[in-house]
Structure formats: structure tokens, C-alpha cells
Image: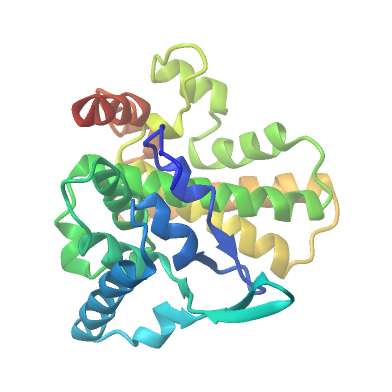
Amino acid sequence: MNEIKEYTDKIFEDIKRLDENGNEYWLARELMPLLEYIEWRKFKGVINRAIINCKGSNYNDLDHFVGADKMVGIGSNTERKIQDYRLSRYACYLIVLNCDPRKKVIAIAKTYFAIQTRKQELTEQEYNNLTEEEKRLYRRNQARKGNYNLNQTAVKSGVKDLARFHNAGYKGLYNGETADDIFKRKKLRYREDILDNMGSEELADNIFRIAQTDAKLKRDNVDNEYTANSVHYEVGREVRNSIKRLGGTMPEDLSTPNKSLKELEKETNKLKE
């Protein structure tokens, strides 16, 4: 097994795959060495315990641990079947919980697969028990994925200037403020990301804007940049109006956290060294 020299969540992100429907999954055989297991027999024992946990949580284990056996060559034109699984993020999380917690990589894996997991794969109690910092990390990951999908949809809708497109959404949500205006108001340092400097509530406002814009562009079959920008602005404004009707705090009035998510991640990594 190759030594894992850099313990960051990137090692898990790099082996993530997407199926034909765009759903993410990990292969057990690729996850095994990253969690520092050499023998499949021992790792299979961990998987079996995770499957038991999955059933005990009233989830259908077949939705999260999908058989992916395959034939591999063993020389002399001979093949043999090896066992493998397609694992959902939740399945990976359960596997990590059953690994040796003394391993340095397990702490990082636990954060990657638990905090960044989809909300529907966490119970309400689990989500509510997260700290504000963990909720921020979780929401930030949602926003990152949402923006990735939105960028793809925007380009298909005729958008060439993505910066202007995103500013249209911010202007609608933030009463005319652009991303640069938000950056200056938050008094951020050069190249800091505004989304890394939002609390969980402000991130949630932006996630809703992102998701609804993506859906409307597709639903309306938008095919030109002008309309796409207008849609993003209008959706942002509608989200703002909804917050106002509900008596919520306007996003620009929400406090900026003392530390960015990048700073928190650096501090966490130092503690693990």
C-alpha cells in the first residue's frame, strides 16, 4: 500500500465517482487503501458491521451498499471474480465509524463523509446537534455543489460571462450588492471567498437562491444570456422578499463569522498533526 502523505479530504474527493444519473458513489476497493486497510478480508468485516448499522437505522442497506463484483485478470489469460461495492456517502460514513479511530486519516474521513453528507442522509437530530461551525461547513459544501450545477446549467442557457451572471443573483438577494460589494462590506482579505465567510443562515439563503435559479433556467428552457441574468436577479429578489415576509433577517444584516472556513480547516489540521 502506498503511504498517504497528505491527509486532507481531497484524497476522498479524488476517488468519488458519478453514476449514469449523476449520483455520487465510492468503490470499496478504492476506499480501502485510503483507510489504511491492506487485506480485503479485514475491510469486508468493517463493511459488514456498517451494513448492520445501516439496517439498524431503518435504511435499506441495498440502497447504500450496491454489489459491484467484477472480473480481473490473474495471468495466463485467466480471470477471477473479486467482490466490490458501490458505496453511497452515508455508507462510507458508517464504514468510517467502524474503523480504528486511532488512525489519523479516520478523523478526516469522518468529517468528509459525515459533515458534508446530504441533509436527507442525516436525521434531524444529527443535523441539529452539529455545531455552528459544522453547519457552516455542511452548508458551504451544499453551496459549492449547487454552484457547480448552476454553472453548467447557465452555460447551457447561453451564459458566457459567469461573473456577471452570479452578480445578478447577488444583486437580487442583497438589495443591489454585487459579490465585490459583499466582499468589501465583510472587510475580507485579498482572494478570500465570501461564501467561506458566511454563517449557516446566510449560506442557506444563498443555497435556496442557487437551487431555485437552476430549476427555473431548466424549467423555462432559457437560451440566452440576458434572460438567464434576469432570471437569476428575479429569483434572488424573490428569496429576499420571502425572507422579509417571514420576518427574517436580511442577508446583509447577518453577522460575519470571526473566522473563515479556510482558517477553521487549517486550525483543525494543525491539531491533528
Q: Residue at x 17, y 58 (%)?
A: 128
Q: Position of residue 193 (x, y in %)?
A: 48, 27
Q: Position of residue 125 (x, y in %)?
A: 16, 66
Q: Is residue 43 left or right of residue 58?
A: right
Task: Out of 11 and 219, give the one closest to the viewer.
Answer: 11
Number of numbered markers = 0
Task: Out of 77 and 256, give the one closest to the viewer.
Answer: 77
Question: Looking at the picture, does residue 23 appear above or below residue 188?
Answer: below
Q: Quadrant of residue 212?
A: bottom right
Q: Is residue 183 left or right of residue 52?
A: right
Question: Looking at the picture, does residue 107 appear above or below residue 262?
Answer: below
Q: Residue at x 71, y 33 (%)?
A: 164
Q: Is residue 107 left or right of residue 23?
A: left
Task: Out of 30 and 13, give the one closest to the viewer.
Answer: 30
Question: Looking at the picture, does residue 24 appear above or below residue 14?
Answer: below
Q: Residue at x 53, y 28 (%)?
A: 177
Question: Looking at the picture, does residue 207 appear above or below residue 196?
Answer: below
Q: Position of residue 136 (x, y in %)?
A: 31, 42
Image quarter (top left, top right, bottom left or bottom right) of the C terminus: top left
